[in-house]
Amino acid sequence: MTEQTAISALFPTGWRPMRLQTLVVLRWLAVAGQTIGVLFVTWGLGFPLPLLPCLTLIGLSAALNIGLVLRYGAHFRLSSRVAALQLVFDLCQLGGLLALTGGLENPFALLLLAPVSVSATTLPSRQTWVIAGVAAVIATIISVVHLPLPWDPVQTITFNRIYVIGIWVSIICGVVFVSAYTNRVAHDARQIADALAATELALSRREQLSALDGLAAAAAHELGTPLSTIALAAKEMRAEVESGSQLAEDVELIIAQSARCRAILAKLRNLGSEPADLFAQAPLTDILDEVAAPHEGRGKVILFYSENATGPDPIFPRSVGLLYGLGNLIENASDYARQTVRIESAWDLASITVRITDDGPGFAPELIARLGEPYLTSRPRDPSGSDAHQPGGLGLGIFIAKTLLERTGARLTFDNAEGAHHARVSIRWQRQDLTDRSPS
């Protein structure tokens, strides 16, 4: 798995980095601080200020918090756009309070940097610069349009215009510095964290693959001896039973199935190795024919389609992992299909896609997002089918197939075609990845 693929898996498109709870808590702190400040100036210091408009603005922030929590829940993750809109609201609310209490002459004008800091730390550069622009506009407006600073009525306080301009310049410089510097530092920190997470994921997946190879080899070794004993006993029974009898047919079936088990164990021993011939390659359609052939005589019809094919035919190395993974998915589709399994292949100059669809009961909707995890049974047996009496498996088939195919550079998705029925597995390779993995 490449670092790009690992990061995409960790942080998919649409990932929302900020929880609603973060902004809600910060806003509650602002509401508490603003309320204490306004009441202290009015009742503690006795300075006149428009108390009702100030409390109305503070109440709007509190109402927004309550409404958001009731609507979405505290743990809802916000998109960058919604988070930016909330920070713009906070700026406008703070700007309104400052306009009612002296504008930039109010020492709390420094708090205009707070929403900009939050944005620069957590949001992309585009949203950060929008919020910085809003902060600069608000600072400019309240430097000109504002009510007098609350002060002792018996005294007169006057600020030199140059001093107010200096405050305005400092606010603008602070906004620009926080937006540029903090956002850049936070971006670098996020890149390092993303790279570390991708590395940890790649190492974890590598450990899982090694464990899978070891488990497969151990299982092949442990099962080899009893399987040979079964085959030997069956051959001895064949010599003693009457030819053409029902018992003779059962013995032949045992011998055939034991031979098939030995072939499967031979594949398991080589899951972690390269193909014997590094130059053994074949077109995709030939590989699909090869892995589907063992399942065509099981009473199900396997149909092949090659549509929307542009560009050169894709050539794949005939690795054990590729053959086993595709064969496992086709076998799984054959087990659950009522009549037909549809295998579609398509390719262009950039990508290659294979879709395996069966006409069975489909994947359980609640399990689709988790398919590919170990020990997860993907679908119940069809209660009306011929295999209704058979127990379900361990839930490792799709996990093993997905793991092996991802080693070839594939990405798998699971869904249900045509409503809730017809389970479909889509396997997609990028031609560039396939070229990089091919022997030169």
Image: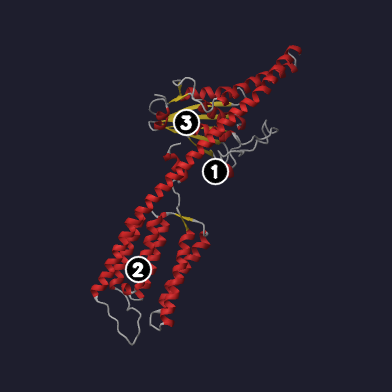
Q: Earlier in the sequence, mark 2 or mark 1?
A: 2
Residue 98, label in figure: none
The vertical placement of 279 against 352, above or below, is: above
The vertical placement of 220 against 3, above or below, is: above
Residue tagged by mark 1?
A: 369
Name the secondary structure under disc 1: helix
User: Residue visible at 49% across and 34% down?
Assistant: 406
Q: Position of residue 149 (x, y in %)?
A: 33, 78
Kindly identify the amino acid type of the residue bearing the numbered disc 3.
Thr
Looking at the image, do the residues carrying marks 3 and 2 touch, with CB atoms under 8 Å apart? Answer: no
Front of the two marks 2 and 1: 2
Let me know if residue 296 appears in the view: no
Q: Position of residue 3 (x, y in %)?
A: 42, 39
Kindly identify the amino acid type of the residue bearing the numbered disc 1.
Ala
In the image, 145 versus 318, the foreground residue is 318
- Mark 1: give few (<14), some (14-19) or many (20+) Cα within 10 Å: few
Q: Position of residue 298 (x, y in %)?
A: 62, 24
Q: Does residue 144 appear left or right of residue 401 in this picture?
A: left
Residue tagged by mark 2?
A: 110
In the image, 384 versus 73, the foreground residue is 73
Q: CA distance from mark 3 to mark 2?
A: 56 Å
Residue 408, label in figure: 3
Looking at the image, do the residues carrying marks 2 and 1 touch, with CB atoms under 8 Å apart? Answer: no
